[in-house]
Amino acid sequence: MAIMGCCTSPCQKGLPQREMSVREFKTWLMRFDMDRNGKISQDELKKAISTLHKWFAWWKAREGVKESDRNGNGEIDKDEIEQFVVYAQQHLNMKIQFT
């Protein structure tokens, strides 16, 4: 299993550097759950994607929520994160290993 490394500089705090497991990805993503409701909103996802230095983070966050949100509540719930993993692999070029 690959392990995720993180930069420690303030500007890149939490930035994934290598491959990671789904569990590590979930842990990284939930760090952006600012209201601690166990769900990732589009705005929270935009902040997470911005740390990856991706262009058009707002658009990718919108599309990520649209593709992952199965119950239509406008957020990515804990049981929907695995669907977002697929989006992150395909559209954010993240290396996430299912184990």
Image (cartoon, rainbow, N blue to C red):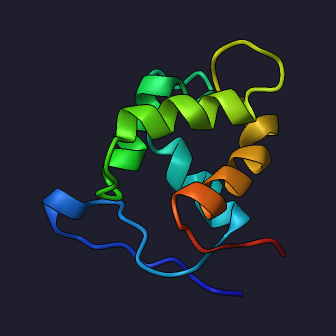
Left or right of 69? Residue 8 is: left
Question: Residue 63 versus residue 23: which sits nearer the camera?
Answer: 63
Question: Residue 73 versus residue 93: which sits nearer the camera?
Answer: 93
Left or right of 48? Residue 96 is: right
Q: Point out the image quarter for the C terminus.
A: bottom right
Q: Position of residue 46 (x, y in %)?
A: 40, 35
Left or right of 40? Residue 60 is: left
Is residue 24 visible from the viewing direction of this image?
A: yes
Quadrant of the image occupied by residue 76:
top right
Q: Position of residue 7 (x, y in %)?
A: 28, 73
Quadrant of the image occupied by residue 15:
bottom left
Is residue 45 visible from the viewing direction of this image?
A: no
Q: Position of residue 53 (x, y in %)?
A: 29, 57
- Residue at the spot x=63%, y=86% of the render? 2
Q: Position of residue 64 (x, y in %)?
A: 60, 38
Up the image or down, 27 lies above or below 45; here it is below
- Residue at the spot x=57%, y=80% of the render? 19
Up the image or down, 4 lies above or below 90; here it is below
Quadrant of the image occupied by residue 8:
bottom left
